[in-house]
Image: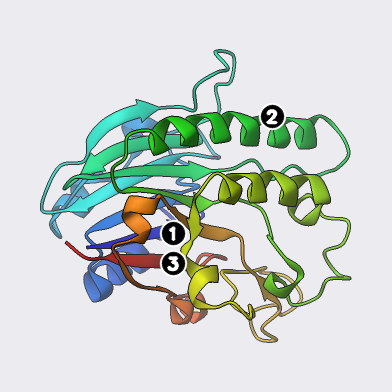
């Protein structure tokens, strides 16, 4: 069972590239972030035409997440991250697909830091940790995946100096991320690439893609039950180089049935 994450940076703007990727790689589950679409404008019929059923949590012009499943309907379990009734940003969606719980997230960026946006990021990560503890208690295969907007270690960025002041790389962001791992979750990409040097994002500016100036912020975290079933995991780097591509590229993990 192949489960993938893709920050698409506008589902309508990238629709040809997105459908191309889905048809060429055929993940069983595809989780999208930054769909930048209101609920009523989400192009569900376009995915149905190629065999995918979808659920989505949209927001006008920014944010938004969706879960697509090949040949079956995702069963929605949670919409929005719990523990803050005033948080109206569309950043979290949870579903079950073929016995696996999928939690799809678009974690706040946090820039500029310090400031209220960074405070929101850290508070969001604490809420995420609480939810992930509830998911772990299910004792079933769970995959928490998406754009975490955290560069976990220095080996996950092309230039430590270039990103030193960014919210993605602050000690508080990294500490919050490693607290998740400390609770028993497995970072799939890092486990298979312990030396680092694997990027999932390249900025549109300054020739970042052409110069391979990227970093890793799209992650796949596995519960022990999912980690036991992991076959392999990877990054579909080539899709970043295609015409009108997202600034992210897909990441994926394959689990034994």
What residue is drawn where x is 57% and y is 51%?
181
Which residue corresponds to mark 1?
A: 6
* Placement of 186 over or under 138, stated as above or below: below
Residue that mark 3 sits on:
250
213 vs 54, left or right, is: right
The answer to the question of whether label 3 and label 1 lie on touching residues, with beta carbons closer than 8 A, is yes
Which marked residue is nearer to the observer: mark 3 or mark 2?
2
- Give the label on residue 123, or none: 2
Of 188 and 118, the residue lying toward us = 188
Point out the frontmost of discs 2 and 1.
Answer: 2
Q: Are marks 3 and 2 in contact (CB under 8 Å)?
A: no
The residue at 48%/34% (across/down) is: 133
Which tag, 3 or 1, sits closer to the chain's start? 1
> For numbered disc 1, what is the local secondary structure?
strand
Disc with the residue nearer the chain's start (3 vs 2): 2
Q: Quadrant of the N terminus?
A: bottom left
| 2 or 1: tag closer to the N-terminus | 1
Quadrant for residue 232, please give it.
bottom left
In the rendered view, tell whether residue 4 sits above or below residue 80: below
């Amino acid at each position: 069972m192949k489960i993938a994450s893709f920050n698409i940076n506008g589902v309508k703007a990238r629709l040809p590239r997105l459908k191309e990727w889905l048809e060429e790689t055929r993940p069983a589950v595809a989780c999208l972030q930054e769909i930048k679409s209101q609920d009523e404008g989400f192009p569900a019929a376009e995915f149905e035409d190629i065999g995918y059923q979808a659920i989505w949590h949209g927001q006008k012009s920014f944010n938004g997440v969706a879960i697509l499943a090949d040949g079956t309907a995702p069963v929605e379990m949670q919409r929005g991250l719990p523990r803050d009734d005033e948080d109206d940003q569309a950043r979290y969606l949870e579903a079950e697909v073929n016995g696996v719980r999928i939690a799809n997230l678009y974690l706040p960026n946090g820039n500029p830091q310090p400031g209220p946006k960074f405070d929101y990021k850290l508070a969001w990560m604490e809420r995420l940790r609480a939810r992930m503890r509830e998911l772990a208690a299910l004792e079933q295969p769970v995959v928490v995946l998406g754009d975490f907007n955290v560069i976990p270690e220095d080996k996950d960025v092309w230039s430590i100096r270039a990103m030193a002041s960014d919210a993605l790389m602050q000690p508080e962001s990294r500490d919050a991320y490693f607290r998740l791992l400390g609770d028993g979750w497995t970072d799939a990409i890092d486990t298979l690439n312990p030396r680092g040097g694997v990027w999932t994002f390249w900025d549109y500016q300054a020739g970042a893609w052409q110069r391979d100036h990227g970093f890793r912020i799209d992650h796949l975290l596995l519960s022990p039950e999912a980690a036991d079933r992991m076959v392999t995991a990877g990054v579909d780097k080539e899709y970043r180089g295609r015409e009108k591509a997202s600034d992210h590229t897909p990441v994926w993990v394959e689990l034994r049935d």
